[in-house]
Amino acid sequence: MLAMPKKHPQTRSAVMRQESLRIAVVDTTFARVDMAKEVLAEFARSPWKVEAVRVTVPGMKDLPVACKRLLDDGCALAIALAWVGGERLDEQCAHEANLGLQWAQLMTNKHILGVFFHESETRVPGEQRRIARERAREHAQNALWMLFAPDELQKRAGTGQRQGGEDAGPLA
Amino acid sequence: MLAMPKKHPQTRSAVMRQESLRIAVVDTTFARVDMAKEVLAEFARSPWKVEAVRVTVPGMKDLPVACKRLLDDGCALAIALAWVGGERLDEQCAHEANLGLQWAQLMTNKHILGVFFHESETRVPGEQRRIARERAREHAQNALWMLFAPDELQKRAGTGQRQGGEDAGPLA
Amino acid sequence: MLAMPKKHPQTRSAVMRQESLRIAVVDTTFARVDMAKEVLAEFARSPWKVEAVRVTVPGMKDLPVACKRLLDDGCALAIALAWVGGERLDEQCAHEANLGLQWAQLMTNKHILGVFFHESETRVPGEQRRIARERAREHAQNALWMLFAPDELQKRAGTGQRQGGEDAGPLA
Amino acid sequence: MLAMPKKHPQTRSAVMRQESLRIAVVDTTFARVDMAKEVLAEFARSPWKVEAVRVTVPGMKDLPVACKRLLDDGCALAIALAWVGGERLDEQCAHEANLGLQWAQLMTNKHILGVFFHESETRVPGEQRRIARERAREHAQNALWMLFAPDELQKRAGTGQRQGGEDAGPLA
Amino acid sequence: MLAMPKKHPQTRSAVMRQESLRIAVVDTTFARVDMAKEVLAEFARSPWKVEAVRVTVPGMKDLPVACKRLLDDGCALAIALAWVGGERLDEQCAHEANLGLQWAQLMTNKHILGVFFHESETRVPGEQRRIARERAREHAQNALWMLFAPDELQKRAGTGQRQGGEDAGPLA
């Protein structure tokens, strides 16, 4: 009863031909931590061939169209890295950026993994840095699994995975 | 005066030819309960032939485009399974995911049943698990009715049905 | 200086040829009152020939794509009937459903009259039932005027009409 | 360095040929003041030839698709007149209507001037009437300037203009 | 592993041919400070040839379609200048305008830099003026970098840049 999902044509063919895939990595000058560096390091450790295409924009509301342009140009997936300040207006911007990312994904039929660190999560600078970096690395891993090893995600379904913090785990 | 709704062409023909229909079942690694398992079990008990196409994504904001890709690839309907954490940011994500699911439906002209469990519904782990599972099963039933037996829904119109809890019932 | 609005081609021709128009009536199993019944009764009392195409979906977030499918299949207008529960999450769902209805209208270039009863309007069951029914009937009337007698609406412009309650009336 | 903006082709040609332009004026039966009357009076006083195409819909969420249909039928611009009640649900409706107006504009590439009076601005009926009327007139003026005399707007850039109340003025 | 992002075709060719690029500068009569003047001054100081195409609209909700029309007419990027009043309704308008700007960008595949000053940032008029002007200038600089020198942005990635205030700086 359980069919294999068919990969989206352009993704599947690239994987099948064992070519390297291009992944867009888009970050901001607003962020206080270089999250893209973590993503690139994770890609470098990967067993899969990945070509990162990096673009930097001023702020998080500039991420959706930047990702869409790179996906339109042939990237298989995008990672959107954002740092959300501690004011109400910053949270409002994050909401608008996230809705833009939804549309960009539906218009391109490709995934954009949003990696947003919110200052409201913790006010301790060292913790902010640690969470932002770890979240970036763990979502880089997710991106690779989505393109090359979807089974890795499926075997973790419903297990309470978290990025940039301890996993919640499955409800026993 | 009351006309039979015409089924959407691709759905109708499949039902008429008695072929098995493909239904997308998309869940997350974030969830703490394996809701997809419940959906698949419900399909297995069904009198109708259904082929489940399962994909797992990291979090709920990844559901809309994952559903859209599977609907574009020929699935007749999608079930989007999500677990919403107890923080304000989790509720914000759920809102963004739900808007994405609205657009994905309108772009594909097919239904996506959103099955979201919110931790704000109850803090008791055993109850959380029970509600999430029951809601998944009851929406799997709804999905089957929508495709194979729309009259089952129509005879329950205005009767206060609830998924994952006691029905509110009709106002007498 | 005041020109007659040109009817949308497909609507105008049907009215001119005196054919019966098809109107989609979409409701939910979630609702606690059979609002569709009121709409159908209002159509039956109408001097105009109308064919109702009724579909029932589980909940209000399923209304937009259900309406869009029926409008794409040739209905001239849709009536979306919803019952909004008393919790914050119910209001959130209503907001998402309403945005979906906006997009569905703009994508089809046809009107969808949203008839939403909110439990927050009154907690008295008898009042809830009365408001929901009356609102459904009055919007069925609006739907007929929009298709067959737009002058009836124009002569009520700016007069504080309300559906499911006393009219506010014009500011004298 | 400062180039003249090129008018949108269909607008520009109409202005150049000195033909009368058609402007959509859409209002509601919900409103408690006849705001369309003020717009028409302002057009009548105008030195420019304008043909108003008026449509009345039940409520503000019906405005976006009504405007879009008229813009698709050739109107050069639309004025959407709304009265927002004093309850939280009314404000929610206004937000949904406004988002619909954003999409309608982007889909048609034409302006829709939203003229919304909110009861939350003042509870004094006489003031409500005065503000609603004055706002309608001032936006009718803006509509004319946008189509026929964009320089009138540009020379007021950054000067704190307000519609339906005293201008805030420029910060000296 | 790090590939050069491919510029969007129409942008790239213009830059390569060393032609002047057209940038849309759209502002409002609502604003209390002439922010467009600051943008034009910044362009004048620029080493790159830029042609500004300026349009003024009444308020911030008129910005998205105005930007989209200019981008459709060939501008390479738009700067949307807005002043957000101090009331709750003003913030609501800003949110709606920002969502419109997201869609306009995704529909045109070009960037629109939103430069919004909010009165809630400070109630001191002199400070309001200073922030609005400085933000406009710094985003004009960002616009130029995005088109002519994307490396300038990339070397500032994750360094806590702010427009219209002191930079937050990188987390050491």
Image: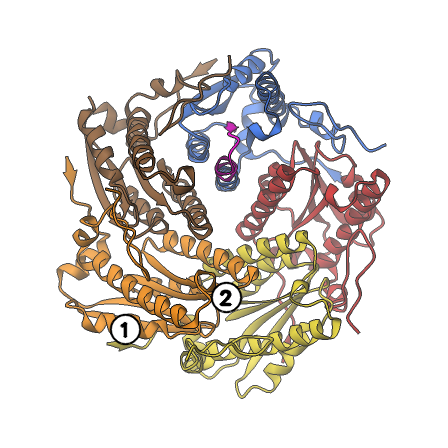
Chain colours: A orange, B brown, C blue, D red, E yellow
| Placement of E80 over or under A103, stated as above or below | below
Q: Nearer the viewer, residue C13 or A79?
A: A79
Q: Earlier in the sequence, mark 1 or mark 2?
A: 1
Count of residue discs: 2
Was residue E101 drawn as part of the magenta stretch in this picture? no
| Placement of C14 over or under A35, stated as above or below | above
For mark 1, what is the residue? A40
Q: Are marks 1 and 2 on the same chain?
A: yes
- Mark 1: amino acid: Leu
Q: Position of residue C104 (x, y in %)?
A: 48, 39
Q: Position of residue B143 (x, y in %)?
A: 31, 29
| Placement of B72 over or under C157, stated as above or below | below
Q: Position of residue D26 (x, y in %)?
A: 68, 40
Query: Residues in magenta?
Result: C78-94
- Mark 2: amino acid: Gly
Label 1 marks a residue whose chain is A
For mark 2, what is the residue? A85
Left of B61 or right of it: where is D84? right
For label 1, the crowd category at 10 Å Cα-Cα, with few meaning under 14, some 14 to 19 and many 20 or more, is: many
In which quadrant of the rendered view does residue A36 lie?
bottom left
Left of E38 or right of it: where is D41? right
Question: Which residue is painted at 51% across and 59% down in the image?
Answer: A91
For label 2, the crowd category at 10 Å Cα-Cα, with few meaning under 14, some 14 to 19 and many 20 or more, is: some
Q: Nearer the viewer, residue B3 or E14?
A: B3
Classify the position of the C terminus of chain D by image quarter.
bottom right
Instruction: Decide if residue A160 is in sight here.
Output: yes
Closer to us: mark 1 or mark 2?
2
Question: Which residue is painted at 40% across and 56% down in the image?
Answer: A104
Left of E31 or right of it: where is C85? left
